[in-house]
Image (spheres, rainbow, N blue to C red):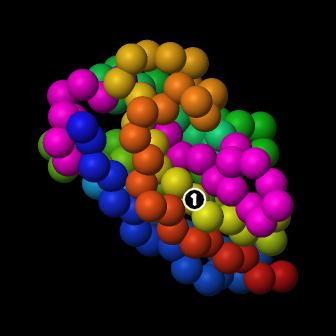
Amino acid sequence: QVQLVESGGGLVQAGGSLRLSCGASGRTFSIYYMAWFRQSPGKEREFAAAINWSGGSTYYSDSVKGRFTISRDNAKNTVYLQMNSLKPEDTAVYYCATDLHGNPYYKRDAYDYWGQGTQVTVSS
């Protein structure tokens, strides 16, 4: 198993920045992708960003590309999401997730373990 714990959410004004962190423990040697998904009230959980744990390749949804940056610190088993130029529509609960098998990184169902989520609220 892999345990994931997110932190760093909060309230920020539009145009501001936040950095989310997700620490992993347990079978971290098996991680293939780490990703961030987000879910707004009344909407399905959607893909935001992913990173290949060994090679470091990164992937983004069109809605966050150019504003968000995903990165990792393998020594700390931690993945980060730097969010800049935040918009009210970025308001959501952000979830960290890990895939141990190399499934398509953008598919919610591909991920094996999830964190508890952290709230991000962007005011206009």
Q: Position of residue 59 (x, y in %)?
A: 58, 30
**Residue 83 occupies quadrant:** bottom right
Is 44 magenta? The answer is yes
Instruction: Say which residue appears at 83% left-offset and 82% top-offset.
Output: 124
Say if residue 51 shows up in the picture: no
Say if residue 9 shows up in the picture: yes
Name which residue type carries label 1: Tyr
Instruction: Say which residue appears at 40% left-offset and 68% top-offset.
Output: 7
Instruction: Say which residue appears at 30% left-offset and 23% top-offset.
Output: 54
Choose between 81 and 98: the one closer to the eye.
98
Choose between 77 and 99: the one closer to the eye.
99
Is 18 magenta? The answer is no
Q: Position of residue 82 (x, y in %)?
A: 51, 57
Magenta-tinted stretch:
24-46
Image quarter of the N terminus: top left
Instruction: Say which residue appears at 46% left-offset and 25% top-offset.
Output: 57
Which residue is identified by label 1? 94
Q: Is residue 72 above or below residue 41?
A: above
Q: Position of residue 29 (x, y in %)?
A: 18, 28
